[in-house]
Structure formats: structure tokens, C-alpha cells
Amino acid sequence: MLVQDDKTPSILRAALVGGLGFLSYHNTHLTISMAKADGFFGNEMQVLDEDNVDPLGSVKIKKEK
């Protein structure tokens, strides 16, 4: 249908195909990343506690003694 539609501008057609291609790639990448984090593909399961998940570092407030 994408090839047969003559009324659709080429730029719009290219943008739609590019967007769908990007979403497919991104979804596959995230699925593989989560599978690796869960221990599939022979990788060790990652520890996902609050100190390792937060990109800004530990959220715990350290008490000074």
C-alpha cells in the first residue's frame, strides 16, 4: 500500500518509514538490553538496587559520625 499510493508526498512517506524503522530498532535494542540485565544470553544477572539504577548516584543520605 505504501508503494501504490500516488497521492502521498515522498517526504511524508520517507518520514513515516524512517520513524517506524527507528521505533523498531529502538524496541529491539531495549528488549535485548533488558534480557541481558535479566541474565539471558549467558550474562550474569545484574543487581538492580537503588544505588546502581539511579544515573545520578546513590540516593541514600550518609550520616556523618
Image (cartoon, rainbow, N blue to C red):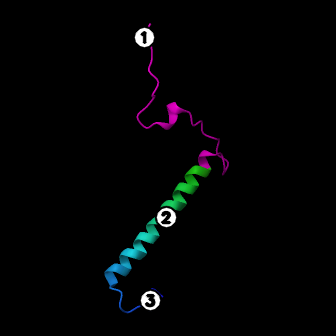
Determine the residue positioned at 56% across, 33% down.
49
Q: Position of residue 56 (x, y in %)?
A: 40, 34
Residue 40 is a magenta residue: yes
- Circle 3 crowding by C-alpha within 10 Å: few under 14, some 14–19, many from 20: few
Q: Nearer the viewer, residue 21 or 41?
A: 21
According to the image, label 2 marks what residue?
A: 25
User: Residue extending furthest top?
Assistant: 65
Q: Amino acid at mark 3?
A: Val
Question: Residue 43's spot in the image, x, y percent?
Answer: 64, 45
Please state which of residues 58 and 40 is positioned toward the viewer in this rendering.
Answer: 58
Tag 1: amino acid: Glu
Q: Kindly report the distance in space between the C-alpha atoms of the residues bearing marks 1 and 3.
A: 67 Å
> Which stretch appears magenta?
36-65
In the image, is 45 to the left or to the right of 24? right
Q: Position of residue 9 (x, y in %)?
A: 32, 85
* Front position among marks 2 and 1: 1
**Contact (CB < 8 A) between labels 1 and 3?**
no
The residue beneath circle 3 is: 3
**6 above or below 12?**
below
Residue indicated by mark 1: 64
Disc on the earlier residue, 2 or 1: 2
Check contact, mark 2 vs mark 1: CB within 8 A. Answer: no
Which residue corresponds to the image point at 40% horizontal and 72% vertical from the top-left? Answer: 18
**In 3D space, how far apart are the residues under numbered discs 3 and 2 (Cα atoms)?**
22 Å
